[in-house]
Image: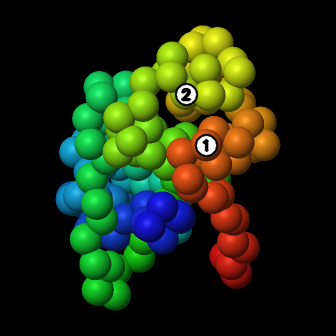
């Protein structure tokens, strides 16, 4: 399953000695941050999560699976980052290189690299097309905040 739920990581919130709230995601190496209060710590946690997951992609590492939330708050990467991680995982599972996916899509390898680059603002229809070639479908859900 590849969706926001697949990438919803539980966050442990604990106060530090200065009264700030530390947000730690034990499932993701390096995903630790803090905020003035719980709300700010969770906003910062999403950013820390995205950075850590993008670093895993850049290092050609597996994307960690989140543990059960068990009543803890969760954070997930934004929609475009989620789509890029889903493409990264689908390519790895299929054993498909950037060059091969590019051939299948009629694109150059550099375009596929941009699809996987978290800093590149790839159009969502390009992500949908790439995922479809790999037998995946991108679905977006909207929930109350």
Q: Mark 2 points at which residue?
A: 101
Nearest the eye: 86 or 130: 130
> Which of the marked residues, 2 or 1, is nearer the chain's N terminus?
2
Q: Distance between the residues labelled 2 and 1?
A: 8 Å
Element under disc 2: helix
Total number of numbered discs in the rendering: 2
Q: Which residue is drawn at 54% across and 45% down?
A: 134
Q: Are marks 2 and 1 in contact (CB under 8 Å)?
A: yes
Nearer the observer, 87 or 17:
87
Residue at image mark 1: 133
Mark 1 neighbour density, 10 Å: few (under 14) some (14–19) many (20 or more): some
Residue farthest front in this picture: 104
Spot occupied by residue 25 in the image (x, y as percentages of width and height): 28, 59
Residue visible at 55% across and 53% down in the picture = 135
Of residues 143 and 145, the one nearer the viewer is 143
* Left or right, residue 71 beside residue 104: left
Q: In which quarter of the image is residue 103?
A: top right
Q: In this orientation, does residue 3 appear? A: yes
Query: From the viewer's perspective, is 11 left or right of 77?
Result: left
Front-most of residues 98 and 78: 98
Q: Is residue 54 above or below residue 65?
A: above
Q: In this view, does 99 lie above or below 26?
A: above
Residue 51 visible here: no
The quadrant where residue 130 appears: top right
Residue 51, percent across and down? 43, 37
Residue 132: x and y in percent read 64, 49
Rendered residue at 48%/70% (across/down)? 5
**Which residue appears farthest toward the bottom when viewing the image?**
71
């Amino acid at each position: 399953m590849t969706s926001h739920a697949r990438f919803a990581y539980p966050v442990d919130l604990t106060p530090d000695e200065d009264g700030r709230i530390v947000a730690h995601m034990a499932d993701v190496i390096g995903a630790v941050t803090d905020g003035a209060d719980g709300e700010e710590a969770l906003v910062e946690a999403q950013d820390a999560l995205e950075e850590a997951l993008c670093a895993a992609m850049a290092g050609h590492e597996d994307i960690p699976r989140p543990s059960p939330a068990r009543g803890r708050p969760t954070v997930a990467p934004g929609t475009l980052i989620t789509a890029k991680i889903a493409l990264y995982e689908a390519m790895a599972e299929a054993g498909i290189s950037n060059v091969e996916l590019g051939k299948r899509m009629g694109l150059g390898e550099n375009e596929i690299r941009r699809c996987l680059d978290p800093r590149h603002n790839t159009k969502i229809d390009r992500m949908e097309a790439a995922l479809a070639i790999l037998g995946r479908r991108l679905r977006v859900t909207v929930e109350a905040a």
